[in-house]
Image (cartoon, rainbow, N blue to C red):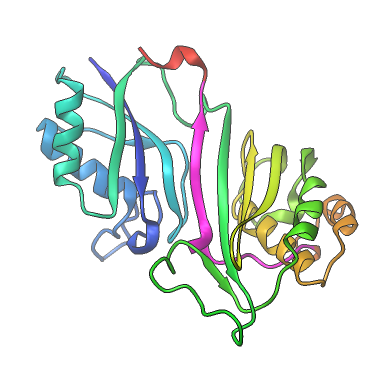
Amino acid sequence: MPNYKLIVSYDGTDFHGWQKQHPPDSEPMRTCQGVLEDTVRRVVREPITILGASRTDAGVHAVGQVAVFSSTRTLPLDRLRIAINGRLPRDMQVRELGLTHASFNPISDALSKGYTYSISFGSPMEHDRPLFDRHLHTWLPVDLDVGLMNEGAQHLVGEFDFASFTRVNHGRKGTVREVYSCVCKETGPHRCAIEVSGNGFLYNMVRVIAGTLVEVGRGQLKPDEIPSIRAACDRSMAGPTLPPEGLCLKWIKYPDVVDL
């Protein structure tokens, strides 16, 4: 039975996150997993289950979400991808589709993930909020020192307990994660992006990292205060959780033996 691996992109604005949700006594919510699963079922004409690598929140986008499903049917890969995309809504697309091993698990087999948090900023007297790409950037009506934000970001690289950078009652067994890189850079006039990669991320972790670095950029924190915030393992010490629209899952890496 073939096992199909997909790389999926979506604009998360009108989705209630990745994971399927069916509240009692109401219609299922519109989720990425639900929409993709229903579409693939119509194409392959049999029940299937989609398993995704990352449970992105409502409003969060993805360029490189990874998902897998099994089918009793062996179909030409190019035609299958075209058929799925032809039935998907305009805010979701399968970028790549291939075969993988039956044992492949997109969650546990992941080696690393990369996220980008995009910000548009500046005094309203000097810079208008984003319009046409407003769903892809968080708008902050303040001036930011991107250089200082990048200095603070370097204190987050390494293996640490990131309890200060996740939601209280996050539901995870442990809060130790390794961040491989964390960079804040200008991407245009009054625009910056925080790029983070690591072996895994806690609930809201990237959005809290972004909120903390924004506090550095607006002068409320110093870059060298980040280590003490990190060491405190206390959510109240870090910055705010920034909105979801600035966050995008960019890529997920796996061992080379995953693809057939």
- In the rendered structure, the answer to whether residue 223 lies left or right of residue 150 reads right
Q: Residue at x 61, y 37 (%)?
A: 200
Range of magenta residues:
238-254
Residue 97 drawn above or below residue 22: above
Q: Residue at x 64, y 33 (%)?
A: 199
Residue 118 drawn above or below residue 53: below
Q: Quadrant of residue 40?
A: top left
- In the rendered structure, the answer to whether residue 221 lies left or right of residue 183 reads right
Q: Position of residue 74 (x, y in %)?
A: 16, 17
- In the rendered structure, the answer to whether residue 24 lies left or right of residue 181 reads left
Question: Which residue reaches farthest bottom?
Answer: 125
Q: Position of residue 248 (x, y in %)?
A: 49, 51
Residue 235 drawn above or below residue 42: below
- In the rendered structure, the answer to whether residue 36 lies left or right of residue 20 reads left
Count of numbered labels shown in the rendering:
0
Is residue 168 among the parts visible in the rendering? no
Q: Quadrant of residue 111?
A: top right
| Image quadrant where one finds the C terminus | top left
Indicate whether residue 240 is drawn in magenta. Answer: yes
